[in-house]
Amino acid sequence: MTGNGRMGAGMQIGVVGAGAWGTALAQMLASDGREVLLWAREPDLVDQINRERRNGLFLPSADLHPTIRATASLADMAVLPILLLVTPAQHLASVLGQIPRSGGDIVLCAKGIEAGTGRLMADVARDAAPGADLAVLSGPTFAHEVAAGLPTAVTLACAGGEAQWQRLSAAIARPAFRPYYSDDVAGAEIGGAVKNVLAIACGVVDGLRLGQNARAALISRGFAEMQRFGLAMGAQAETLSGLSGLGDLVLTCSSTSSRNFSLGKALGEGASAASVLSNRATVAEGAFTAPVLAGLARDRGISMPIVEAVVALLEGQAPAHKVVASLLSRPLRAENPLG
């Protein structure tokens, strides 16, 4: 493998993507002394992780466990039975297509919808790795808290059912990291993708200083949009109301630790989306997901006015205060989460 050290014969799990979330997952998995292989695209970052035990670019707060080893070779990942895919959603197909592998478990940890195709990550992975057993890990997770060992609960949705769940939960669960089983892969994915867009909207509310009442209302009405879209796409209501839906929504709509929320806050304060996104080392997935999500909803006749408002902001169609005013002037009606 690339970098210092070599891959141990008993190594079972790899994390593909050494951004903040991928590094945090590797740190969590290595917390009990198990070996974890972490792939990074940048050779300098691989060297820093292996030599200095830190990721100064994406997660500088963490002193990485000594059983984490980094590599820049995707071929090194191919031999491991369990891979967590944590690359940005828009790069999942290209990265997965470069891993010479058949079979094994692939756990999808990116939250988004592929631009241009409208595919969820599981659909992308099925095409790129047709022999793999797929699962989705999603939920309310700030990377720095997971890396610090703070208590976290997630949804682990397994396309392979309970047999796959037993296999993966034994490999992934830690005392402070608790997965809950689901067989609703689509629901887990939709919750994670939609909440990113809604978090941008909540950031706008914060940037405009519209208050906590407005944010609570937006979270509630945004959750209604998530439910309408999710149920129309075959998700289960229980999944959307759980950790990977409502739970993740509440977390990311409430803190600047969310990249999507902080993007929305900047938009609310008057910045342009292009200027904010060009100055970031990390990806705000909601910026890519919003127009795709809005298009899918329009094609299916699903009302998602908050998502449409986020698209208008991202595309510079109107300033934030006018977009919010348009939302507030919508016709009065009965409160119906599914109507």
Image (spheres, rainbow, N blue to C red):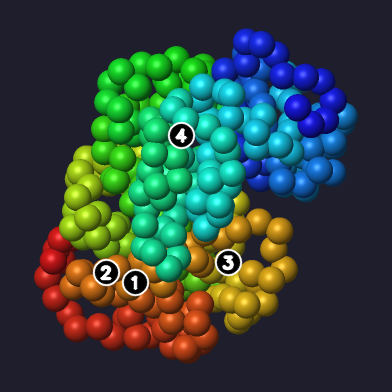
The amino acid type found where label 2 is placed reads: Ala
Q: Quadrant of residue 132?
A: top left
The amino acid type found where label 4 is placed reads: Val
Estimate the x, y position of residue 338 in percent, counting from the top left.
15, 61
Q: Are marks 1 and 4 in contact (CB under 8 Å)?
A: no
The amino acid type found where label 1 is placed reads: Ala
Asked if residue 288 lies left or right of residue 126, the reply is right
Identified at 31% across, 40% down, the residue is 185
- In the rendered structure, which disc, 4 or 2, sits on the residue that comes first in sequence? 4
Q: In which quarter of the image is the N terminus?
A: top right
Return the residue at label 4.
107
Disc 4 crowd rating (10 Å Cα; few below 14, some 14-19, many 20+) is: many
Taking the view exactly as shown, the residue that stands out farthest to the right is: 51
The amino acid type found where label 3 is placed reads: Leu
Return the residue at label 2.
297
Estimate the x, y position of residue 101 in percent, counting from the top left.
52, 32
Q: In which quarter of the image is the C terminus?
A: bottom left
Q: Are marks 1 and 2 in contact (CB under 8 Å)?
A: yes
- In the rendered structure, which disc, 1 or 3, sits on the residue that comes first in sequence? 3
Residues 107 and 55: in front is 107
Taking the view exactly as shown, the residue that stands out farthest to the top is: 10
